[in-house]
Image (cartoon, rainbow, N blue to C red):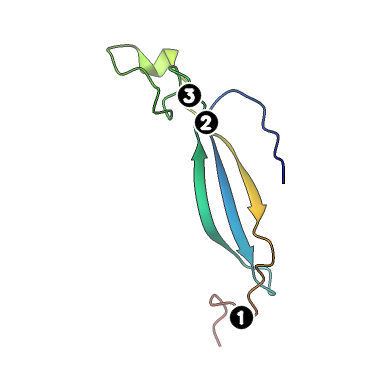
């Protein structure tokens, strides 16, 4: 699978499994680093004294969600008898 995200800021990829009953469970999360010094979420964020709140991005770009292939467990733990 090839994903195309517009370059810019850090974003999060969330993988999930979906049960036969339609409940979804997160199986994996990953933050993808934009490597920008003016992004608060990047390990490359500048560490020196600066006005971070007004000069750096404070928002993690909306999540990209993907359904894990062949991940439809037959029974859902959320349904209670």
Q: Residue at x 27, y 12 (%)?
A: 49
> Is residue 2 or residue 72 the one in the foreground?
2
> At numbered mark 3, what does the secondary structure look like: helix, strand or loop?
loop
Q: Residue at x 48, y 20 (%)?
A: 36
Q: Is residue 12 above or below residue 43?
A: below
> Is residue 53 or residue 73 the one in the foreground?
73
Instruction: In the rendered structure, find residue 10 and report the number of the disc placed on it.
Output: 2
Alpha-carbon span between mark 1 and mark 3: 41 Å
Alpha-carbon span between mark 1 and mark 2: 35 Å
Q: Residue at x 63, y 24 (%)?
A: 7
Q: Provide the residue designation for mark 3.
A: 35
Percent from the top left, x then y, of residue 62? 59, 37
Percent from the top left, x then y, of residue 27? 53, 60
Q: Is residue 75 above or below residue 30?
A: below
Left/right of residue 11 with respect to residue 44 in the rendered view: right
Q: Residue at x 50, y 45 (%)?
A: 30
Left/right of residue 55 with respect to residue 62 in the rendered view: left
Q: State yes or no: discs 1 and 3 in contact (Cβ < 8 Å).
A: no
Q: State yes or no: discs 2 and 3 in contact (Cβ < 8 Å).
A: no
The answer to which image quadrant residue 76 occupies is bottom right
> At numbered mark 1, what does the secondary structure look like: helix, strand or loop?
loop
The answer to which image quadrant residue 70 occupies is bottom right
Alpha-carbon span between mark 2 and mark 3: 8 Å
Query: Neighbour class for label 3 at 10 Å: few (<14), some, many (≥20)?
Result: some
Of badges 1 and 3, the one in the foreground is 3
First in residue order: circle 1 vs circle 3: 3
Q: Provide the residue designation for mark 1.
A: 75
Which quarter of the image is occupied by the C terminus? bottom right
Which residue occupies the extreme bottom position in the image? 81
The answer to which image quadrant residue 9 occupies is top right
Q: Is residue 9 above or below residue 25?
A: above
């Amino acid at each position: 699978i090839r994903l195309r995200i517009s370059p810019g800021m850090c974003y999060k990829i969330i993988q999930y499994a979906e049960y036969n009953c339609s409940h979804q469970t997160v199986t994996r999360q990953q933050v993808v680093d934009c490597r920008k010094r003016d992004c608060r979420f990047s390990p490359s964020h500048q560490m020196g004294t600066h006005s971070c709140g007004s000069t750096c991005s404070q928002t993690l770009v909306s999540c990209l969600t993907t359904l894990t292939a062949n991940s439809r467990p037959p029974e859902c733990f959320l349904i209670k008898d």
